[in-house]
Image: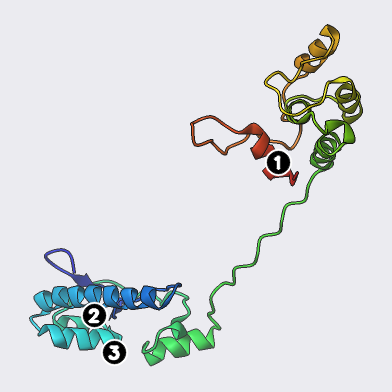
Amino acid sequence: MAGKTITMMPGALMMIHDAWSGASGNADSFRGLADSLDVMSNTFAKVYSERTGKPVKVCRDLMKAETWFSPETAVAEGFADRVGAGPIMKAMAFNYTMYANAPTQLLELASAHDWKPTPNFPQKEPEMTEDTQGARARMKAILQSKEAEGRKDLAEHLAFDTEMTAEAAVALLSRAPSGGKTSNPYAGMTYSERRIAAAQPAMPAAGLAQPSHPRAGGGVDLVASMKRRHGVE
Protein backbone atom coordinates (compact mmCIF):
# COMPACT_ATOMS: atom_id res chain seq x y z
CA MET A 1 0.00 0.00 0.00
CA ALA A 2 3.01 2.28 -0.29
CA GLY A 3 3.04 5.21 -2.69
CA LYS A 4 0.60 7.99 -3.43
CA THR A 5 -0.89 6.19 -6.43
CA ILE A 6 -1.33 2.42 -6.82
CA THR A 7 -1.64 1.33 -10.43
CA MET A 8 -2.53 -2.23 -11.43
CA MET A 9 -1.79 -3.31 -14.97
CA PRO A 10 -4.27 -5.40 -16.97
CA GLY A 11 -3.94 -9.06 -16.03
CA ALA A 12 -2.56 -8.27 -12.56
CA LEU A 13 -4.08 -9.66 -9.37
CA MET A 14 -4.04 -8.48 -5.77
CA MET A 15 -4.59 -10.81 -2.82
CA ILE A 16 -4.79 -9.86 0.85
CA HIS A 17 -4.54 -12.43 3.64
CA ASP A 18 -3.84 -12.86 7.33
CA ALA A 19 -0.24 -13.04 8.48
CA TRP A 20 1.06 -16.59 8.61
CA SER A 21 4.20 -18.45 9.59
CA GLY A 22 5.68 -21.87 10.20
CA ALA A 23 6.81 -22.88 13.67
CA SER A 24 8.27 -25.61 15.83
CA GLY A 25 8.50 -25.83 19.58
CA ASN A 26 6.40 -26.42 22.66
CA ALA A 27 2.88 -25.22 23.46
CA ASP A 28 4.09 -21.90 24.85
CA SER A 29 6.02 -21.24 21.63
CA PHE A 30 2.90 -21.79 19.54
CA ARG A 31 0.76 -19.59 21.79
CA GLY A 32 3.32 -16.83 21.55
CA LEU A 33 3.48 -17.15 17.77
CA ALA A 34 -0.33 -17.01 17.49
CA ASP A 35 -0.38 -13.80 19.51
CA SER A 36 2.35 -12.30 17.32
CA LEU A 37 0.47 -13.21 14.14
CA ASP A 38 -2.68 -11.52 15.47
CA VAL A 39 -0.71 -8.36 16.18
CA MET A 40 0.72 -8.34 12.65
CA SER A 41 -2.64 -9.05 11.00
CA ASN A 42 -4.37 -6.29 12.99
CA THR A 43 -1.60 -3.88 12.01
CA PHE A 44 -1.95 -4.76 8.33
CA ALA A 45 -5.74 -4.37 8.58
CA LYS A 46 -5.27 -0.81 9.85
CA VAL A 47 -3.08 -0.01 6.83
CA TYR A 48 -5.75 -1.36 4.46
CA SER A 49 -8.38 0.60 6.38
CA GLU A 50 -6.49 3.87 5.96
CA ARG A 51 -6.07 3.23 2.22
CA THR A 52 -9.64 2.12 1.47
CA GLY A 53 -11.69 3.94 4.09
CA LYS A 54 -13.24 0.63 5.16
CA PRO A 55 -13.54 -0.24 8.87
CA VAL A 56 -10.63 -2.20 10.30
CA LYS A 57 -12.87 -5.19 11.06
CA VAL A 58 -14.08 -5.32 7.45
CA CYS A 59 -10.48 -5.33 6.21
CA ARG A 60 -9.54 -8.03 8.68
CA ASP A 61 -12.46 -10.18 7.53
CA LEU A 62 -11.32 -9.78 3.94
CA MET A 63 -7.84 -10.87 5.00
CA LYS A 64 -9.16 -13.93 6.84
CA ALA A 65 -11.13 -14.90 3.73
CA GLU A 66 -7.98 -14.61 1.55
CA THR A 67 -9.62 -12.18 -0.87
CA TRP A 68 -8.44 -11.75 -4.47
CA PHE A 69 -9.01 -8.63 -6.60
CA SER A 70 -8.77 -7.98 -10.30
CA PRO A 71 -7.47 -4.50 -11.23
CA GLU A 72 -11.00 -3.20 -11.69
CA THR A 73 -12.25 -4.71 -8.42
CA ALA A 74 -9.23 -3.43 -6.50
CA VAL A 75 -9.93 0.11 -7.75
CA ALA A 76 -13.64 -0.19 -6.93
CA GLU A 77 -12.84 -1.42 -3.39
CA GLY A 78 -10.25 1.29 -2.80
CA PHE A 79 -7.15 -0.93 -2.73
CA ALA A 80 -5.81 0.59 -5.96
CA ASP A 81 -6.23 3.96 -7.66
CA ARG A 82 -6.30 3.13 -11.34
CA VAL A 83 -5.87 0.47 -14.00
CA GLY A 84 -2.88 1.05 -16.19
CA ALA A 85 -2.85 0.90 -19.96
CA GLY A 86 -0.99 -1.85 -21.76
CA PRO A 87 -1.26 -5.37 -23.13
CA ILE A 88 -2.59 -8.11 -20.87
CA MET A 89 0.29 -10.28 -19.70
CA LYS A 90 -0.02 -14.04 -19.55
CA ALA A 91 -0.34 -15.60 -16.13
CA MET A 92 2.95 -16.79 -14.66
CA ALA A 93 3.36 -20.54 -14.27
CA PHE A 94 2.64 -21.08 -10.58
CA ASN A 95 1.03 -23.67 -8.35
CA TYR A 96 -2.07 -21.64 -7.44
CA THR A 97 -3.64 -24.69 -5.76
CA MET A 98 -1.56 -23.88 -2.67
CA TYR A 99 -3.96 -21.02 -1.92
CA ALA A 100 -7.30 -21.56 -0.19
CA ASN A 101 -9.39 -19.22 -2.35
CA ALA A 102 -7.47 -18.61 -5.58
CA PRO A 103 -9.64 -17.59 -8.56
CA THR A 104 -11.17 -20.57 -10.36
CA GLN A 105 -9.61 -19.59 -13.69
CA LEU A 106 -6.13 -19.72 -12.16
CA LEU A 107 -6.79 -23.07 -10.52
CA GLU A 108 -8.01 -24.47 -13.83
CA LEU A 109 -5.00 -22.99 -15.63
CA ALA A 110 -2.58 -24.53 -13.13
CA SER A 111 -4.34 -27.88 -13.40
CA ALA A 112 -4.42 -27.82 -17.22
CA HIS A 113 -0.68 -27.11 -17.44
CA ASP A 114 0.21 -29.33 -14.46
CA TRP A 115 1.98 -26.48 -12.67
CA LYS A 116 3.48 -27.97 -9.54
CA PRO A 117 6.23 -26.90 -7.17
CA THR A 118 9.70 -27.97 -8.21
CA PRO A 119 10.78 -30.68 -5.76
CA ASN A 120 13.93 -30.07 -3.75
CA PHE A 121 16.09 -33.08 -4.54
CA PRO A 122 18.67 -33.88 -1.86
CA GLN A 123 22.15 -32.96 -2.97
CA LYS A 124 24.46 -35.88 -3.51
CA GLU A 125 27.11 -36.17 -0.87
CA PRO A 126 30.47 -35.47 -2.53
CA GLU A 127 32.69 -38.50 -2.78
CA MET A 128 36.12 -38.43 -1.23
CA THR A 129 39.00 -38.39 -3.67
CA GLU A 130 41.81 -40.90 -3.40
CA ASP A 131 44.07 -38.16 -2.04
CA THR A 132 41.56 -37.27 0.68
CA GLN A 133 41.05 -40.92 1.60
CA GLY A 134 44.79 -41.42 1.74
CA ALA A 135 45.31 -38.37 3.96
CA ARG A 136 42.57 -39.53 6.32
CA ALA A 137 44.04 -43.04 6.52
CA ARG A 138 47.50 -41.59 7.18
CA MET A 139 46.28 -39.48 10.10
CA LYS A 140 44.39 -42.39 11.64
CA ALA A 141 47.40 -44.65 11.29
CA ILE A 142 49.52 -42.17 13.24
CA LEU A 143 47.01 -41.15 15.90
CA GLN A 144 45.67 -44.65 16.57
CA SER A 145 49.03 -46.37 16.58
CA LYS A 146 50.31 -48.00 19.75
CA GLU A 147 53.34 -45.70 19.61
CA ALA A 148 51.06 -42.63 19.96
CA GLU A 149 50.02 -43.68 23.47
CA GLY A 150 51.58 -41.27 25.94
CA ARG A 151 52.85 -39.08 23.09
CA LYS A 152 49.64 -37.26 22.19
CA ASP A 153 51.18 -33.85 21.41
CA LEU A 154 53.86 -35.23 19.15
CA ALA A 155 51.44 -37.62 17.40
CA GLU A 156 49.02 -34.79 16.63
CA HIS A 157 51.85 -32.61 15.39
CA LEU A 158 53.11 -35.31 13.04
CA ALA A 159 49.59 -36.15 11.82
CA PHE A 160 48.27 -32.64 11.25
CA ASP A 161 51.27 -30.36 10.82
CA THR A 162 53.57 -32.44 8.61
CA GLU A 163 53.47 -34.59 5.51
CA MET A 164 55.62 -37.32 7.04
CA THR A 165 54.45 -40.79 6.03
CA ALA A 166 52.59 -42.84 8.62
CA GLU A 167 55.44 -45.34 8.77
CA ALA A 168 58.08 -42.67 9.36
CA ALA A 169 55.91 -40.90 11.93
CA VAL A 170 55.25 -44.09 13.87
CA ALA A 171 58.95 -44.95 13.81
CA LEU A 172 59.78 -41.50 15.17
CA LEU A 173 57.09 -41.83 17.87
CA SER A 174 58.58 -45.13 18.99
CA ARG A 175 61.85 -43.35 19.79
CA ALA A 176 60.24 -40.42 21.62
CA PRO A 177 59.72 -40.52 25.40
CA SER A 178 56.21 -41.21 26.66
CA GLY A 179 54.54 -40.04 29.81
CA GLY A 180 51.68 -37.72 28.92
CA LYS A 181 51.32 -34.21 27.65
CA THR A 182 54.39 -32.04 27.37
CA SER A 183 54.88 -28.47 26.20
CA ASN A 184 57.78 -29.63 24.04
CA PRO A 185 56.75 -32.35 21.56
CA TYR A 186 60.40 -32.88 20.58
CA ALA A 187 61.63 -33.63 24.10
CA GLY A 188 63.93 -36.66 24.20
CA MET A 189 64.51 -36.74 20.43
CA THR A 190 67.91 -36.45 18.84
CA TYR A 191 68.91 -33.27 17.03
CA SER A 192 68.50 -34.97 13.63
CA GLU A 193 65.07 -36.32 14.52
CA ARG A 194 63.95 -32.86 15.66
CA ARG A 195 65.08 -31.35 12.37
CA ILE A 196 63.26 -34.01 10.37
CA ALA A 197 59.99 -33.46 12.27
CA ALA A 198 60.17 -29.68 12.28
CA ALA A 199 61.20 -29.39 8.63
CA GLN A 200 58.18 -31.27 7.31
CA PRO A 201 55.90 -28.87 5.36
CA ALA A 202 52.66 -28.04 7.06
CA MET A 203 49.53 -29.60 5.66
CA PRO A 204 46.97 -29.30 4.04
CA ALA A 205 47.70 -31.97 1.53
CA ALA A 206 45.33 -32.53 -1.38
CA GLY A 207 41.71 -32.31 -0.33
CA LEU A 208 42.40 -30.73 3.07
CA ALA A 209 41.55 -27.10 3.73
CA GLN A 210 42.82 -24.81 6.42
CA PRO A 211 40.59 -24.98 9.55
CA SER A 212 37.81 -22.46 9.90
CA HIS A 213 36.66 -23.04 13.49
CA PRO A 214 38.02 -20.27 15.73
CA ARG A 215 38.66 -20.82 19.39
CA ALA A 216 36.85 -18.71 21.94
CA GLY A 217 40.11 -16.89 22.63
CA GLY A 218 40.52 -15.83 19.02
CA GLY A 219 42.99 -18.45 17.76
CA VAL A 220 42.32 -21.55 15.67
CA ASP A 221 42.27 -25.05 17.12
CA LEU A 222 43.95 -26.89 14.27
CA VAL A 223 43.86 -30.30 15.91
CA ALA A 224 40.17 -30.17 16.81
CA SER A 225 39.29 -28.85 13.35
CA MET A 226 41.17 -31.58 11.52
CA LYS A 227 39.67 -34.26 13.74
CA ARG A 228 36.16 -33.01 12.98
CA ARG A 229 36.81 -32.88 9.24
CA HIS A 230 38.24 -36.38 9.01
CA GLY A 231 36.33 -38.35 11.60
CA VAL A 232 39.24 -38.97 13.93
CA GLU A 233 38.15 -39.68 17.51
**Which numbered tag is attached to residue 227?**
1
Which numbered disc, 3 or 2, marks the residue closer to the eye?
3
Residue for point 26% across, 83% down:
70
| Residue for point 59% across, 68% down | 120
Would you place residue 23 above or below residue 68 in this image?
above
Percent coordinates x, y for residue 151 in the rendering: 79, 28
Alpha carbons under labels 2 and 1: distance apart: 61 Å
Q: Position of residue 11 (x, y in %)?
A: 32, 78
In the figure, is residue 161 to the left or right of 50? right
Three-letter code, disc 3:
Ala
Quarter of the picture holding the N terminus? bottom left
Q: Is residue 128 visible?
A: yes
Residues 94 and 192: in front is: 192
Q: How is the image coloured?
A: rainbow
Label 1 secondary element: helix
Q: Which one is earlier in the sequence, the residue at label 2 or at label 1?
A: 2
Q: Which mark is residue 71?
A: 2
Report which quarter residue 160 is drawn in: top right
Which numbered mark, 2 or 1, is in the foreground of this view? Answer: 1
Question: Of the residues shown, which amino acid type is indicated by label 2?
Answer: Pro
The residue where tag 3 is placed is 65
Badge 1, how many Cα within 10 Å: few under 14, some, many 20+? some
Q: Residues within 10 Å of mark 3 (few under 14, many from 20)?
A: some
Quarter occupied by residue 140: top right
Q: How many marks?
A: 3
Is label 3 in contact with label 2 (beta carbons under 8 Å)?
A: no
Image x and y of residue 178, in percent: 82, 25
